[in-house]
Image: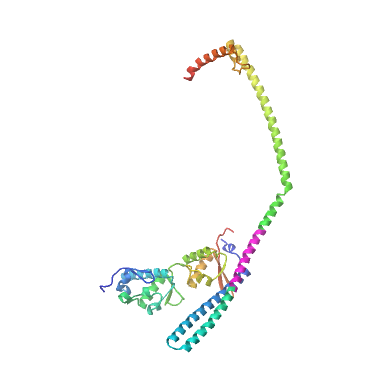
Amino acid sequence: MASTSFSPYKTASGFLLPSIHSAPPFFTQQPNLSTQITHTAHWTRLILSYARHRQLFLLRVEDAETSGSNWDEILKNERINRKLLPTHLSFILADMVSKNLAIYEPVRQTRSVLLYWRTPEEWAEVLHGWADSTGQLNTILTFYDIVEPPVPSPLVGLPLTMLRKAIAILAKTSRAQTIAVADGEGVRFLSGNTTR
Amino acid sequence: MGGNQSVPKITKQDRAILDLKLQRDKVKQYQKKIQGILDREHDIAKQQLAAGQKDRALLALRRRKYQEGLLAKTDAQLENLEQLVSTIEFSLVEVSVLHGLQQGNEVLKEIHKEMNVDSVEKLLEETAEAQAYQREIDEMLANNLSAEDEDAVLKELERLRDEVLGETKPEQAKLVHFPSAPSTEPVSPMPAETEAVPAQQGQERIPVAA
């Protein structure tokens, strides 16, 4: 234990882990209430910034139960031989959902969440901005076009649930219009200038 | 706020384009799947070779070859679809350009109805006439004014004269003695007189200038 240093550590994917991540007690659910609150806040912040760094959207309790997922760099620390337990992760996820930082996705279960490292409102702006800058306003687009475009974009891999929410927000200000046909659905982004 | 009014209607062409794009997406996803199979068969072939099973490896490579053929065919289909989509989108652009031209043309026609050549000519003529008329009036008024002015000036002159005649004569001489331009060439007796006068005036003037 003397060999571990409480300092930030840069992971293979280029993410800087905070020094608290090198502290063994961080990986144990603390009985003391104030410590627990502090630790949960730290974990929440860590999870959200990692998700933003790697463009990850879903976090599952399962990711703490198995290895090889995208979350290993966060949920485990081999250097101090610690990992986050599934029950602890479940507790953190529940806390995040209660603070509107994530939602259970799909609904009616508590093992997997969709992370809100951007709120749907922010995603709506990113979406509209992307459509504008790629000259795709007033063009019919499929959802596939948006989340798996030929050119990398900030929207790659966006879960459809979040995409739908963002589109709904844009529709309220007349900046998007959904279209449905027999085979599926699509969306058209508009400039939203109500000067017509 | 009536938000729906600013959202364009969904036309049949829009639905057609969406349909095409959805089909194109399906083809793309199919391609991805095939690519996955290709990679997997490649790995299997390598494993079989490592395990010394040449026949199995050959089989895997043959399967892979077949899938590659499928992939090439779907590439061609995808190109067709994408071309059709861009042609349709381009023709929509053309339609809106044409629409814009039509509207512009109609607006121009309306303007010309109000502003035809004859009425413009008539207007210009009338304006020129009115301007000439105005100039006449101006001249008349100008003449009137100067005639009035002259009468007033003459009357004033007579009044002053009466005043002056009632006073001393030297002043009358002064009244008459206005500086006038020489009507003849300057001759020697004249410079003597003019020299005396400016000298006097000069002496008078010097204190004034100071």
Horizontal and vertical percent for residue A179? 57, 70
Is B89 part of what is drawn in magenta?
A: yes
Horizontal and vertical percent for residue B124? 71, 43
Can residue A183 be seen? no
Bounds of the magenta segment: B80-102
Comparing A104 with A42, the one in front is: A42
Can residue A93 be seen? yes
Horizontal and vertical percent for residue A4? 28, 72
Say whether residue B35 is left or right of residue B90.
left
Image quarter in which the N terminus of chain A is found: bottom left
Horizontal and vertical percent for residue B156? 63, 19
| Residue at the left extreme, as displayed | A2
Say whether residue A125 is left or right of residue B147.
left
Comparing B45 with A154, the one in front is: B45
Tell me which residue sits at (48%, 72%) in the image: A159
Q: Is residue A52 above or below residue B70?
A: above
Occupied quadrant, residue A114: bottom left
Q: Main secondary structure of the magenta part?
A: helix
Occupied quadrant, residue A12: bottom left
